[in-house]
Amino acid sequence: DGTVDAFENDQQYVSIYPNPANGQIVIKSIVHSPQTTVILLNSLGQIVLQSKLSTQNVTLDVSHLQPGIYFVKISGGAEVYTRKVVVN
């Protein structure tokens, strides 16, 4: 099953810190362009934040979010990366 290998290999493309987060998260990606989008989804799959990733780093303010598990989805062209982040 190549799923685990693919997930481990794409760790080099996207990192999110701090995780767990308190007030903000920094998303660092080598995959970025004016068309690359960052979407933060709650555990129900609802979009709670959306931003463009036109530079290597983007900071998202998560201080207004309820504590819980969220998913960061980065999509640019054919590539899509998803990461889990915990907001305290």
Image (spheres, helix red, strand yellow):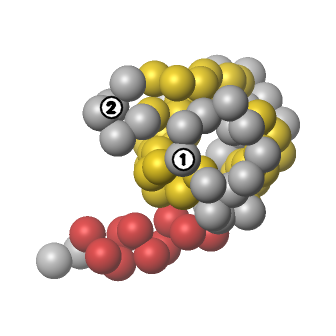
Q: Secondary structure at mark 1?
A: loop
Q: Seen in the image, is 10 located left or right of residue 50?
A: left
- Residue 52: image location, x then y, percent: 70, 24
**What is the residue that sits farthest to the left in this orientation?**
1
1 or 2: mark nearer the eye? 1
The residue that label 2 is drawn on is: 45
Q: Where in the figure is residue 24, as x and y percent of width and height?
A: 77, 45
Q: Residue at x 42, y 36 (%)?
A: 42
- Kindly indicate whether the residue at mark 2 contacts the one at mark 1 (C-beta within 8 angstroms): no
The one of 7 and 62 positioned closer to us in this rendering: 62
The amino acid beneath tag 1 is Pro
Residue count near mark 1 (Cα–Cα under 10 Å), binned few <14, some 14–19, many ≥20? some
Q: Residue under label 1, please give it.
A: 67
Which secondary structure lies at badge 2? loop
Cα distance between the residues tagged 1 and 2: 15 Å
Q: Is residue 17 above or below residue 47?
A: below
Asked whether residue 33 appears in the rendered view, the answer is: no
Task: Residue at 66% x, 46% y: name it.
Answer: 31
Q: Is residue 41 visible?
A: yes
- Dividing the image into 4 quarters, which one contains the C terminus? bottom right
As rendered, which of 47 and 13 lies closer to the eye? 47
Residue at coordinates 54% horizontally, 30% vertically from top-left?
Answer: 39
Question: What residue is shown at x 60% (from left), y 34% (from top)?
Answer: 65
Q: Position of residue 67 (x, y in %)?
A: 54, 47
Q: Amino acid at mark 2?
A: Gly
Sort mark 2 into few (<14), some (14-19) or many (20+) by Cα contacts within 10 Å. Answer: few
- Asked which quadrant contains residue 21, the reply is bottom right
**Residue 3 circle label:** none
Specify which label sits upstream in the sequence, 1 or 2: 2
From this view, report whether residue 21 is shown above or below residue 71: below
Quadrant for the N terminus in the image? bottom left
